[in-house]
Image: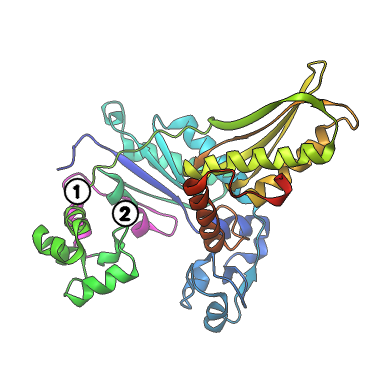
Amino acid sequence: MNDPQRIIAHFDLDSFFVAVEILNDPSLRGKPVILGHKERGIVTTCSYEARKFGVHSGMPGNKAFQLCPHGIFIKGTYGSYSKYSRWVTEIIASKAPLFEKASIDEFYLDLTGMDKFFDPLQWTIDLRQQIIDETRLPISFGMASNKMVAKIATDEAKPNGYLHIPFGKEKEFLAPLAVNKIPGVGDHTYEVLKSIGIKTIRDVSLRTPEELEARLGKWGVSLWQKSHGIHTREVTQYHEAKSISTENTFFENVTDVNFLMSELVRQTEKIAFELREDGKVAGCIAVKIRYPNFETTSRQTTVPYTCADDEIIPVAKELFHKLYKKGTPVRLMGVRLSELTNNAVQTNIFSDVERKTDLYKAIDDVKNKFGKVKLKRASSS
């Protein structure tokens, strides 16, 4: 069972992308705002006002338009999302002894042991209020004895609220909720469970692990455990200062800009691939140049969190052109990605994220099977 000393808080920035857009344009407040295109693509997210009409994230844009023709469809200003995410991260990092950034708008805090000195619930309430006061973003949290229950509690506390589930009350809290409230129960699994008479989490808890395993495989046993409020995954310490880089000292000094551009693309492809292999995204890109007299210069810029070559390469090229002394031979050149965090799929909502993710997965699979140099951009050749 759960350790009574574990105290986990889960923070979620409510309708984060919409909230940022409202801060950028207050006239959107209280209106049915939908991030996406009304004729193509999918809805990234939407305001609570739009949800009242049945609009939800992942829905085709044309379907959202049918449900909510008076909705305000916007592309958004994606540079602001990384800015606000970093702002919230900095506030949490300055206060919490141990936290995990699960995505651009989601955080887990491990407050275990803090109850010996003060009330963790009041401490978390105060932290939430500080985030609201400083960033003006709405934020909800759930507190419980493990990550799963805390996350579900957050969902129940929305919008812009909080909910504490005392130790020993996990099963009681979960019982009446629909079974698809459990993370990992998608639409397909939900339909399978309903077909065998399971609609609530209580229904799961009343079955045997063996029965569920026969229907769902090993995941059935995990589902049974979750229905009893059992979850042991720990909060993973967040480190944003890590970086990944590559550089090359040329055998001969190079003045051919076309060659340097090709090398820059090759280096960027290399570390972007490694980034995806680690399941990370980067929020900062830097380029370094060293000249024959060993003068070394570098320049960096922050970007919306990404791991995509086509988003990183243009920035690296722009940095190079700002750095490079035209006509001067180059001895060394390198690229570094930093401000790394876990891969939050909603990094750049203006891209077709799902399609791009599948594309890079296919590319990376080929590289893993046949070697990293077997598949590369023409501009790196």
Camera-near label (2 vs 1) is 1
Residue at the image point whose x is 57% and y is 33% from the top: 244
Residue type at numbered disc 1 = Ile
Q: Which residue is mark 2?
A: 153
Per the image, the residue denoted by label 1 is: 230
Can you give x and y, in whole percent of width and height, for residue 105 in the image?
Answer: 49, 49
Q: Secondary structure at mark 2?
A: helix
Q: How far across and how far down the image is residue 230, in percent?
A: 19, 48
Residue at the far bottom: name it.
66
**Which amino acid lies under the numbered mark 2 shown in the image of this protein?**
Ala
- 161 to the left or right of 55: left
User: Which residue is nearer to you in this view: 263 or 359?
Assistant: 263
Instruction: Report if residue 261 is visible in the image.
Output: yes
- The quadrant of the rendering that contains the N terminus is top left
Image quadrant where residue 247 sits: top right
Disc assigned to residue 16: none
Which region shows up in magenta? Answer: 152-176
Q: Does residue 79 appear anywhere in the picture?
A: no
The image position of residue 110, as x and y in percent, is 34, 36
Q: Which of the two residues, 335 or 260, is positioned nearer the viewer here?
A: 260
Residue at the top extreme of this rendering: 293
- Element class at badge 1: loop
Residue 133 placement: quadrant: top right
Counting residues from the N terminus, which is met first, the one under dot 2 or under dot 1?
Answer: 2
